[in-house]
Amino acid sequence: SLILSFGLAFTRYDALSAPEWVGLDNFKALLDHRLFATSLKNSLFFIAVAVPLRVAAALGLALFLHRRRTGVGATRIAVFLPTVIPDAAFALIGLWVFNPLYGPLNLGLTALGFTPPAWLVDPATAKLVFVLMSLFQIGEGFVILLAARSEMSPELFEAASTLGCTRGQAFRYITLPLLMPWLLLLSIRDIMMSFVTTFSQAHLMTQGDPYYATMFTSLLIYEEAFDHFHFGLASAMMLVVFVGCLLLIAVLAALTRRMRHGSD
């Protein structure tokens, strides 16, 4: 359980002998850990780039597809479909698409006359692969925002149009404030889920390479616990990540409240 894992953060435990209480030694060890700071930077980069893009993409598609017209049903299914693909299968698809030699993406870029990047082989672009892949699995957020937009009364927008509001003004002063609680919920969910999604893909696709450019915190925790049997140290990492997530969520909630008060 979560409480047990947090308790192990203050012990030295290798799953072969009884836990030994060490106090804050595991947290002190994190300060000198050669990969922990790198993994935090990689995870924060993913959160800072992927989460806003995922929420924005889900919002844009929900607003574009909320009206019923020809082909909308099939498009909605196409948006949601990648979300149900298992992580392992999705990672294998990513390995094929972003293969620098025979991947369809680089073949297409070469045919168009561009110099294709090395993607997973280059530390400068490896993290971007995971960001791009995350943008295809936004089905859950899309469905939530689509339902929220569909529940808005058309009379609100008719009244705004009568008063001379443009579409941009209607979005800023009606649509966005009404969707803000859902956008906050999705942002919080994506921040927490980022540590899960990056693990499975990084573990299967790169194992932290090249040069630790894709060594995310979740992958490092797994390696410390199950490769090196440093369960106490891994639990300390998890506790730091948990507290960091809470702080990020608190900052996000505070910024959202300030934006809502500013719009009022």
Image: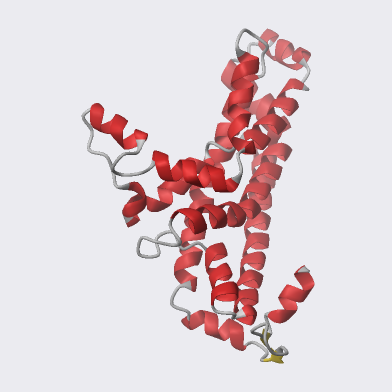
Where is residue 182? Give x, y as percent. 72, 38
The residue located at (66%, 71%) in the rendering is 239
Seen at 73% across and 39% down, the residue is: 181
**Colour option used:** secondary structure
Q: Quadrant of residue 3?
A: bottom right
- Residue at image x 44%, y 62%? 208
Q: Quadrant of the N terminus?
A: bottom right
Residue 26 can be seen in this image = yes
Q: Is residue 115 above or below residue 10?
A: above
Q: Position of residue 156 (x, y in %)?
A: 75, 17
State left or right for residue 223 relative to residue 21.
left
- Residue 126: x and y in percent read 38, 52
Q: Is residue 11 left or right of residue 46?
A: right
Q: From the top left corner, tell me how far across and down residue 141 is, in percent.
A: 66, 36
Which quadrant of the structure image shows residue 67? top right
Q: Is residue 69 left or right of residue 118?
A: right
The residue closer to the viewer here, 262 or 91, is 91
- The residue positioned 62% from the left and 17% from the top of the image is 74
Look at the image and tell me in which quarter the C terminus lies.
top right
Residue 251's image quarter? Answer: bottom right
Q: How many marks?
A: 0
- Viewed as shown, does residue 96 lie left or right of 224? left
